[in-house]
Image (cartoon, coloured by chain):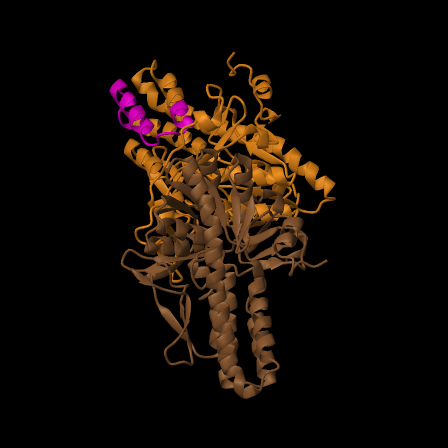
Chain colours: A orange, B brown
């Protein structure tokens, strides 16, 4: 999407033809800078340190990481080594393993001299495929926004979102944001309430930043605020992303999503989840009991990082010395609270039957 | 309650007999320092800047503010001016208006030379009355904790609370925390999940601080986390405070309370609100439509203040330049989501009939 008027993606091949550019997302929202990845190690570091994050973008970055490895040494040993190193960067993202499997399948049976070129081609395809899926999600979600806009006689549509399921989490367009960008670009009046999303603040630091750079009207709110807004009719719909959807339509997403789903349900506000279909895990049914929830480091809760008045980036401790903290990264929203799943094949009910009907080739008996 | 082993209150008359001491709560949890209020303006500033906060403490501070005004000028004009100035400091808390009414009633028909002494006496009584009420709330709430503890065969009782309805919000004991302190002091195993409570972080900076200083086991959690904990049986009960309860039992409290009430309801976790009866506003019925919700400054959402590694207090900006923010201070939890109101007269159902029966002298026809 746009940054300072210029079309920008989260990952690209540099003009030298032998390195990959990324936005260093750890510097956002206060600094916008790109980093050039020249080696497998650069790519692994970028994923591990969360310079790139978001399941689809992690997948694309890993694919390009394999390409960088092949540029230097296209041996079988290096291919396996690169794949293993990249797989070890982040423990949970399903897209990471998927992208690496795709790369291995494309390269293993190919002569070494062809591997680098084939790797670049496949990595690029993975990125383009992500964009195409997100655009389809956008088109289906756009119709939902359009329908609300027409009911409101063109008054602006207020969308609440949680965390960052924006273009920064993908190669472009984002998942939850794709319908919003499409609506905005087509001239529909749309406004986004971006949940801050403690403890890592992805809503305030990433979603607000990308919406602002593209020119989409938005307001940052504390995670506590969404319920109040919904009680007073100030939210027309919720759209969030997800890290994993189960066969029965339970949604695992950033901690706090469940609370917003409860508020939406209590106030008759439609609650949508936008996702590329690879996010559906047909091997899991009951999200609450079957999905292990990652617990992350205390420092994410105990501290906040931001910009001082004189422009320095500083980290401050916001809990008392000696107070323990808990940091659950995700929660599960039961299917009963979800109005619909916005996928590349259309809006699907959050139920076993509907999911199996929409993705018969993936659903198991 | 205890701070470094020493019994401490939030407000007191200084030994010079002409000024009031308070804990500067804006410096917590990183610095524990007191401030001396010498004038009406000092008292108004302390309330407005939230050096003192919490509905009962605001009431006590306003009462002492009237005393400070009377010390300097006991005229009718100054009495009215002081009352108006103090009333204008915070819009939502009912205790502020109540305490000022009490002071006016105690002073208006008194000769000027007697007013300062009478004001001091009445302000002190208001403070002592707050402590006595909180202790009664504590005794009634303690029975609820005790009952859960006996059901759990003495395993520790996990209480979730939001914001700070602790002794720092009152003169001593607190409202939501009074049952917890009593339970802890009597040797019951109790553990508190303290919601961080963005944007002002009163849970992390005040509740965690006061629990820690008194030695009560606790864990600070992001506001997003409570729903997940309740889904997994990790919360036995919720106790929060309130700024205003309506005649039908709707509860106005810190923004985000409603979301926790929804989660408690969805998971069968009892949700209690602890309050001194002056917090009940029998003139208001439907909390959602009749209680005006204070909107506060953007900087509370846009920034966070904390301690750097080298011990400096620093404020950092946590939203992108140019991103608007919204800062609603309170929300309303409908009576239907509330298990009971813990008052100084016992646990009362959140309903018009029960409230009128418990407080017949205040309920209106």
Q: Is residue B58 visible?
A: yes
State left or right for residue A175 relative to residue A307.
Answer: right
Residue B233 placement (x, y as % from top left): 45, 34
Q: How many marks?
A: 0
Which residue range is magenta in the image? A70-99
Residue B52 placement (x, y as % from top left): 46, 66
Is the C terminus of chain B in the top left, top right, bottom left or bottom right quadrant? bottom right
Q: Residue furthest top?
A: A365
Residue B294 placement (x, y as % from top left): 58, 59
Comparing B73 with A266, the one in front is B73
- In which image quadrant can residue B30 be found? bottom left
Q: Magenta region, mostly helix, strand or loop?
A: helix
**Residue at the spot 55% in from the left edge and 51% down from the top edge:** A219
Q: Is residue B198 visible?
A: no
**Residue A93 within the segment the image draws in magenta:** yes
**Residue at the spot 56% in from the left edge and 41% down from the top edge:** B262
**Residue B204 within the segment the image draws in magenta:** no
B14 to B228, vertically: above or below = below
Comparing B345 with A155, the one in front is B345
- In which image quadrant can residue A269 be found? top right
- In which image quadrant can residue A151 be found? top right
Is the N terminus of chain B in the top left, top right, bottom left or bottom right quadrant? bottom left
**Residue at the spot 51% in from the left edge and 63% down from the top edge:** B56
State left or right for residue A363 relative to residue B192.
Answer: right
Comparing B315 with A318, the one in front is A318
């Amino acid at each position: 999407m746009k940054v300072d008027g210029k079309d920008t993606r989260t990952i690209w091949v540099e003009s030298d033809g032998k390195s990959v550019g990324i936005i260093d997302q750890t510097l956002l929202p206060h600094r916008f800078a790109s980093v050039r990845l020249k080696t497998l190690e650069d790519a692994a570091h970028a994923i591990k340190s969360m310079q790139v994050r978001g399941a689809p973008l992690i997948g694309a970055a890993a694919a390009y990481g394999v390409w960088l490895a092949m540029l230097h040494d296209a041996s079988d040993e290096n291919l396996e080594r690169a794949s293993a190193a990249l797989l070890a960067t982040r423990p949970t993202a399903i897209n990471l393993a998927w992208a690496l499997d795709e790369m291995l399948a494309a390269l293993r049976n190919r002569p070494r001299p062809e591997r680098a070129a084939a790797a670049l081609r496949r990595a690029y395809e993975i990125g383009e495929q992500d964009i195409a899926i997100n655009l389809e999600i956008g088109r289906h979600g756009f119709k939902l926004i359009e329908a609300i806009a027409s009911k409101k006689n063109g008054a602006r549509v207020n969308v609440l979102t949680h965390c960052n399921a924006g273009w920064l989490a993908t190669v472009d367009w984002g998942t939850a944001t794709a319908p919003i960008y499409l609506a905005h670009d087509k001239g529909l009046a749309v406004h986004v309430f971006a949940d801050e999303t403690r403890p890592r603040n992805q809503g305030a630091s990433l979603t607000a930043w990308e919406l602002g750079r593209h020119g989409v009207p938005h307001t940052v709110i504390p995670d506590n605020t969404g319920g109040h807004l919904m009680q007073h009719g100030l939210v027309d719909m919720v759209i969030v992303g997800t890290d994993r959807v189960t066969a029965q339509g339970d949604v695992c997403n950033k901690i706090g999503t469940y609370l917003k789903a409860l508020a939406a349900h209590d106030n008759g506000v439609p609650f949508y989840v936008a996702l590329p279909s690879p996010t559906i895990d047909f091997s899991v049914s009951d999200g609450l009991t079957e999905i292990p929830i990652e617990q992350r480091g205390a420092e994410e809760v105990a501290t906040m990082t931001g910009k001082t008045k004189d422009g320095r980036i500083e980290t401050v401790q916001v809990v008392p010395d000696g107070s323990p903290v808990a940091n659950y990264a995700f929660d599960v929203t039961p299917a009963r609270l979800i109005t619909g799943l916005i996928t590349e094949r259309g809006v699907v009910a959050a139920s076993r039957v509907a999911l199996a009907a929409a993705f018969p080739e993936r659903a198991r008996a």
